[in-house]
Amino acid sequence: MPNVIQRSLTLNDIPDLIALSKEVDWPDYNAEELTSLLTNGYFTGFTTTDGQVISCAGLFQYDRVASIGAVIVSETHRGLGLARKMIDTLLRQSDQRVPVVLTATTQGQPVYEKIGFHTAGYIHTYKAQKTNPSALRVSGEIRLSPADETHLSSIEALDEKGAGTNRSSFLINRMSRAAFRFIAKNEHHETTGFAFGVETPANLMIGPLAANNEQTALSLIQSLISSYSGAIRLDMQEETAERLHTSLVEAGFTKTNKAHFMMIRGKEKQNDPALLYFLASQAFS
């Protein structure tokens, strides 16, 4: 392939990756978010002969599943098969014994289907510029408190039900990045939910969030949106969206996108469908 070179990407490539994400109008990727992505995963990409990064894709390997995300190709180099080559590289790099998942854009879905991915579900995105926290009718029996490192074991257990895999090191990193983090307990002092809110240049990204029931989920959401006055984004599994849609709309959110959750080397999602679950981001799944 003329004039492009594939290589692993590192923290030194962050300035080029910021420029690349701005080119394709992905405003969530600043230096802090890209540092998190690169330190939690393995990235491959293509550069021009003078070293400018013109594509990227990341692999996040967990114990029972791997996730591919942050797949970007510069508009100046589309149609050359770069996305296909990057995905092939990441699939070879991944643990061959476990499924690999990703959330597909409209443009990317046909590429992934040709590789062998199939749709295993859907991810719904909700956004709000201004929210109405009081519209969320929540129970006074749910006790919320700031989450810290002492809560990690219970957070890991709930996240594993939602993500279908253990992600302890990722959660430690995500907690350190979170501007807001809450844990929920019931009247018996049992942990029933948790939520992180991470600030990006475009939004407060709520996730991961996991809750055993709707009241806990709504209580966590209410606390997060009451703590923040800017734009807010939620990415959630379809099962969660179906249960919370009316409440989210009443609180000021609008559903802005429905994306294919795709999988290869497996047939069904490994998460607990009864758990209300929001993604940390579509890259991390």
Image (cartoon, rainbow, N blue to C red):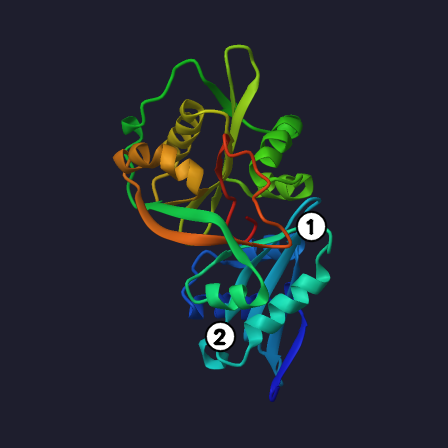
Look at 53% across and 22% down and name the residue there: 192
> Which badge, 2 or 1, is on the more N-terminal residue?
2
Residue 101 in the image: x percent, y percent? Answer: 58, 53
**Looking at the picture, which amino acid does disc 2 mark?**
Ser
Q: In which quarter of the image is the N terminus?
A: bottom right
Residue under the image location 41 percent in, 63 percent down: 106
Q: Mark 2 points at which residue?
A: 74
Where residue 9 appears, as percent x and y from the top left, is: 65, 67
Residue 163 percent coordinates (x, y): 58, 40
Q: Label 2 to label 1, Cα distance in Å? A: 30 Å
Q: Front-most of 93 and 225?
A: 93
* Vertical comparison of 52 with 108: above or below: below
- Nearer the camera: disc 2 or disc 1: 1
**Rendered view: 14 above or below 162:** below
> Which residue occupies the foreground of this view, 207 or 83?
83
Reading the image, the residue beneath label 1 is 98
Mark 1, secondary structure of its residue: loop
> Residue drawn 50% across and 58% down?
30
Q: Is residue 274 visible?
A: yes
SS under mark 2: loop
Which mark is drawn over residue 54? none
Q: Residues within 10 Å of mark 1 (few under 14, many from 20)?
A: some
Query: Is residue 108 among what the camera can see?
Result: no
Q: Which amino acid does label 1 sit on?
A: Val
User: CB atoms at circles 2 and 1 under 8 Å apart?
Assistant: no
Q: In the image, residue 44 lies at what x, y percent?
A: 64, 67
Using residue 17 as the reference point, say whether residue 27 is left or right of it: left
Q: Which residue lies furthest to the top in this view?
A: 188
Above or below residue 85? Residue 273 is above
